[in-house]
Image (spheres, rainbow, N blue to C red):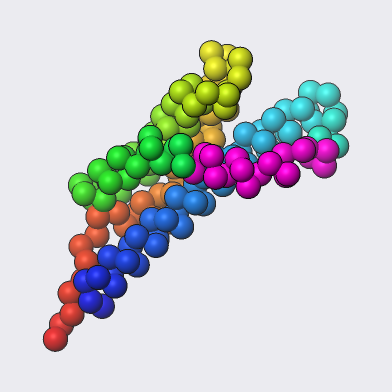
Amino acid sequence: MNRPLAGLKRFVIIAVGYVAAVLTSILVPVLLITLLEGIEYGNWSLVFTFDWLGSFPLAVLTVAICALLIVGPAILLAERLSLRGWFYFAVTGAITSIAFGVFVPGSAGGFVFNPGFLGFLATAGTAAGSVYWLLAGRKSGRPIQRDAG
């Protein structure tokens, strides 16, 4: 495979991994809140009454753009230094999710300094970092193969 095509392939893998991680970081808190609401109050209908489906595309776009400003340098660093460990991506995801919740206005409302909310953010970020690692991070920084002939 020639060098530009291999680079394009790697870029696509990174992009797909990033989008999957963004979706994970949005869905995990929703599922955790629904699970806790169902356990505590027996209100399992919350899954079906969520009005978040209408705003889901806007949430994905907002999180994808804003989080890329935070996690983009970490992805570039991983590619440059060939960092492939799960722990790096899980911690990076948790830090990014907490930073997003604290620094992006309106994303966290009044819950920013609530330890439970920060736990939700850290859990969502760790899950997102794990998904990114599975799809793209395990092979970060791999040298691009050159043609034999």
Frontmost residue, 73 versus 47: 73
Residue 16, above or below 72: below
Quadrant of the rendering where the C terminus is positioned: bottom left
Look at the magenta stretch and give its main secondary structure: helix
The reply to whether residue 116 is visible in this rendering is no
Residue placed furthest toward the left: 149
- Is 105 situated above or below 114? below
| Magenta region, residue range | 47-64
Residue 91: percent from left, percent from top? 39, 34
Query: Going by the image, does 92 lie left or right of 141?
Result: right
The x and y percentages for residue 120 are: 57, 27
Q: Residue 101: x percent and y percent?
A: 51, 26
Q: Nearer the viewer, residue 22 or 145?
A: 22
* Residue at the image point whose x is 32% and y is 57% from the top: 139
- Position of residue 40 in the picture relative to residue 131 (left or right): right
Q: Is residue 82 above or below residue 110?
A: below
Tell me if 145 is positioned left or right of 19 in this view: left
Q: Is residue 69 visible?
A: yes
**Magenta run includes residue 143:** no
The structure residue drawn at horizontal position 46% and vertical position 23%, both measured from the top left corner, is 103
Q: Answer whether residue 63 is magenta in the image.
A: yes
The quadrant the N terminus occupies is: bottom left
